[in-house]
Amino acid sequence: MVEIRIAGGTVSVEVMGWHKLWALRGRVEVPVRHITAVRADPDVSIGWGRGVRLPGTHVPGRIKAGTYYEGGRKVFWDVTRPARAIVVDLSDDRYDRLVVEVEDPAAAVTRLQDAVRRAVP
């Protein structure tokens, strides 16, 4: 699971607890202006999938965490409970997409969408 913090035009995705070990990363930071879309997606699949894991952890049906190359996209994952997953699409960034589990998906989506609206000149 992650905690999302927004400050100074930057979104910080803080990977919590043991997930740091599984994702091999403690934090992902992206400028708010790089966010192109945000949505809750309780149907994300952490089962068998296509793509290359570099580096990360994948136990089908249990956890998908770390960096993956999927269909020409670089995606950061940290999901054990898909019902709590959100998807953040990015442009001009190190990652093309973040797929992460949060405590309250609806609240996280609203906070991120509000930050994106405020960042638009």
Image: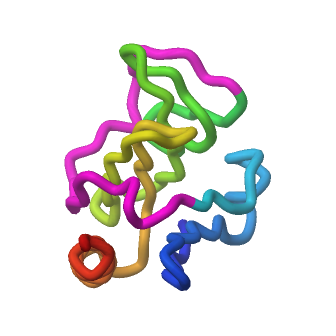
Residue at 54%, 83% (x, y): give it.
8
- Left or right of residue 70, residue 59 in this image: right
Does residue 76 appear in the picture of this structure?
Answer: yes
Q: Where does the image place residue 54, in percent across and percent down from the top left?
A: 68, 24
Relative depth, front residue between 47 and 106: 106
Residue at 31%, 53% (x, y): give it.
87
Q: Does the magenta stretch include residue 102?
A: no
Residue at 54%, 84% (x, y): give it.
7
Q: Where does the image place residue 68, in percent across and percent down from the top left?
A: 54, 28
- Quadrant containing the N terminus in the rendered view: bottom right
- Left or right of residue 55, residue 60 in this image: left
User: Toward which corner of the image does residue 100 lie, by quadrant?
Assistant: bottom left
Q: Is residue 31 magenta?
A: yes
Relative depth, front residue between 16 and 26: 26
Looking at the rendered structure, the number of numbered marks drawn on it comes to 0
Relative depth, front residue between 66 and 60: 66
User: Toward which corner of the image does residue 105 lie, by quadrant?
Assistant: bottom left
Relative depth, front residue between 38 and 104: 38
* Up-down relation of residue 48 to residue 21 (above or below): above
- Quadrant containing the C terminus in the rendered view: bottom left
Residue at 49%, 62% (x, y): give it.
31
Does residue 64 appear in the picture of this structure?
Answer: no
Give the magenta-colored segment's residue range.
Answer: 30-54
Q: Where does the image place residue 107, in percent across and percent down from the top left?
A: 27, 84
Q: Where does the image place residue 32, in percent across and percent down from the top left?
A: 42, 66
- Left or right of residue 42, residue 87 in this image: right
